[in-house]
Amino acid sequence: MAGTLIALGGNALQRAGGSGSWKEARASLRAVAPVLAEAAQTSGTLVLTHGNGPQVGALLRQNELAADELPGLPLDVLGAETQGQIGYLIQSELTPMLRRRRVGRSVLTVISRTEVRANDPAFLHPTKPIGRYYSEAESRLLRKKLGWSMVDDRVRGGWRRLVPSPRPVRWLEGPLVRGLLDTGAGGRWIPVVAGGGGIPVVRRPSGAYEGVEAVVDKDLAAALVARELGLETMAIVTDVPGAALSFGRSGERWLGEVSRQELANYRSRGEFAEGSMEPKVDAGLAFLSGGGRHFLICDIPSLPRALRGEAGTRVG
Ligand code: ADP
Ligand code: MG
């Protein structure tokens, strides 16, 4: 299907160093909306996905502070909450912008689950830091009382909880959304899907799906979505204008148009940091080898030009 997936990073929704208020979130999205509306005008099918790191962090903290009064909610439920909250935000800010540009499309948020394997080795080695920083004493207590895996990240401010980040294998709502778009609804709807990488679920022997305490990488989930929908273009939008070689060091070089092979070589040379740029590159390579045509990494301001092949890191 001729169409584009745009994956918005956390920075598109919440400014680094901001207060995290709802007013700020609205303002950030209001700034992004014209760019998304322009993409809706120029691409065929448009599908959106987004990260949820700061938002899920805030909900975890709310749970913690309210623990004396209300039972805490598990991580899968908090993931669902962030999909609702961010989907609502996109619906309310993008819709007026579409109207203004006379784009006759409506935004539709789909609460999405991502199947992961119960025997994924990631469950034995949690790697994804979530939530706030804790003191040494707090972390000792939490590890004992709640059985959390935690990592000492003293340079940044203390101990953090680690959860597994299993590989996404299936997007459960994918066939439904695909069916919807295949009926030609791509011209009428802009689905917002798999927010935060989707709610991680495992299939039990009974056939039922159950949420798990894990986080699916949103970039890898984006590649799964783009392939499931057979989209031609996947754009990962973050807070840097592309992928760089020698990032942050002398001789830093931003990549423009690169071949798949070159990108794969840079990856194996360790040019892209684990947990931030590397999963984007992995997602892009997976998307292209699964039949995708164009993969882009860019920031919000450069997105319109990146979609025209004039900015960002472009592969394929
Ligand atoms: P997002 O919320 O958009 O997923 P991330 O923080 O996970 O954002 O990833 C983007 C970050 O990746 C950039 O802000 C940058 O600090 C980091 N990064 C690591 N390696 C590179 C690289 N080689 N080129 C560009 N950015 C890189
Ligand atoms: Mg990220």
Image: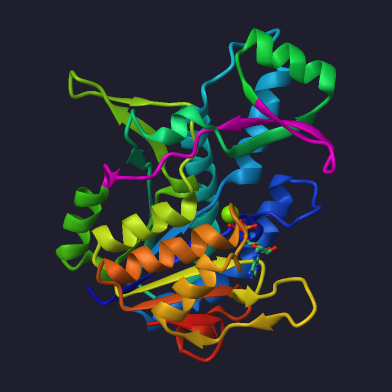
In reply to whether residue 165 is colored magenta, the answer given is yes
What is the x, y in percent for residue 284?
A: 42, 67
Give left or right: position of 61 versus 164: right
Give left or right: position of 135 versus 80: right
Quick check: 315 above or below 188? below
What is the x, y in percent for residue 163?
A: 55, 31
Q: Nearer the viewer, residue 108 or 206?
A: 206
Quick check: 1 above or below 310? above
From this viewpoint, is residue 177 visible?
yes
In reply to whether residue 290 is colored magenta, the answer given is no
**Most distant residue in the front direction:** 269
Specify the quadrant of the image occupied by residue 41: bottom left
State which quarter of the image contains the N terminus.
bottom left
The magenta segment is: 150-173
Quadrant of the image where one finds ligand 2: bottom right
Q: Nearer the viewer, residue 212 or 103?
A: 212
What is the x, y in percent for residue 185?
A: 23, 65
What is the x, y in percent for residue 166?
A: 42, 39
Q: Nearer the viewer, residue 234 or 25?
A: 234
Specify the quadrant of the image occupied by residue 180: bottom left
Instruction: Name the residue located 85 percent from the left edge and 43 percent from the top edge.
Output: 155
State which quarter of the image contains the C terminus.
bottom left
